[in-house]
Image (spheres, rainbow, N blue to C red):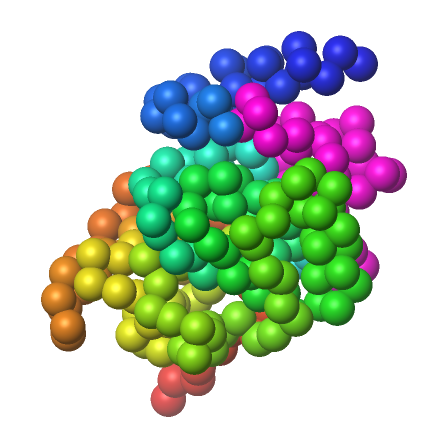
Amino acid sequence: MDLNQARFNMIEQQIRPWEVLDPKVLELLSVVRREDFVPLAHKALAFVDMEIPLGAAPNQVMLAPRVQARMLQDLAVQKTDKVLDIGTGSGFMAALLGHQGASVLSLETDAALAAQARANLQKAGVHNVTVRQADGSQGAAADGPFDVILLSGSVAEVPAVLLQQLSVGGRLVAIVGDDPMMRATLITRSGDNSWTTTEPWDCTAPRLSGFPEPSRFQF
């Protein structure tokens, strides 16, 4: 397989049609080697429009390329931004964020995935990302505030504790809702106690571990 041609096809056939047109994002996707963050058993799927399994649990996946690219574009990461990445997985999104921001703290509940992500990031030469095994649902208040928070998976709702960890002007992106109806949600902190929310596109994704599900019980 010609990896460079496969990468080019991924960008042109999957990512651009999903309204990812920011030249900085497209350039980054052509430079950061996605295949180096895919488990060896699934290397042939690195550029396919699908979620790639990363571990034994069904929610341990690498999100589809177009979803990762669109989230990255929505976050509009700046060189001075301090970033919190929740759900490290293989470390690919953390690598992309590391290239764009000043520093990245990436949280992963699974110890084996966290270790693999560290190895992947080191091999890729990304040195401004710290991977920590931790429950991402609580964020990392002691390390904040953050200019950018990314949830690499879906949640029923965004916990208020994460919104409080955004700096004023900071952005959070998550996939929110219940299968089969979820929406990408961009929340911007506009003041000390005010946030604005937009839901720019539809998407589904596996649940992030550790995030609470609201009670479905009704009389």
Q: Per the image, is 184 magenta?
A: no
Q: Is residue 56 magenta?
A: yes
Q: Position of residue 30 (x, y in %)?
A: 56, 22
Report whether 152 appears left or right of 219. right
Q: Count of labels shown? A: 0
Quarter of the figure with the N terminus: top right
Q: Is residue 71 visible?
A: no
The structure residue drawn at horizontal position 66% and vertical position 40%, both measured from the top left corner, is: 125
Q: Residue at x 50, y 14 (%)?
A: 12
**In the figure, 205 relative to 100: above or below?**
below
Question: For residue 135, what is the image quadrant?
Answer: bottom right
175 left or right of 42 in image: left
Q: Nearer the viewer, residue 196 or 114?
A: 114
Residue at screen point 37% across, 36% down: 73
Depth check, front residue: 134 or 204: 134
Q: Nearer the viewer, residue 179 or 67?
A: 67
Residue 130 vs 71, above or below: the answer is: below
- Please state if 33 lies on the left or on the right of 179 as rendered: right
Vertical relation: 18 (above or below) 41? above
- Residue 35 at least partly seen: yes
Q: Position of residue 156 (x, y in %)?
A: 43, 66
Instruction: Report the span colored magenta.
Output: 29-58
Residue at (47, 35) in percent of width and height? 69
Residue extending farthest to the bottom is 219
Query: x and y percent of residue 188 in the render?
Result: 23, 57
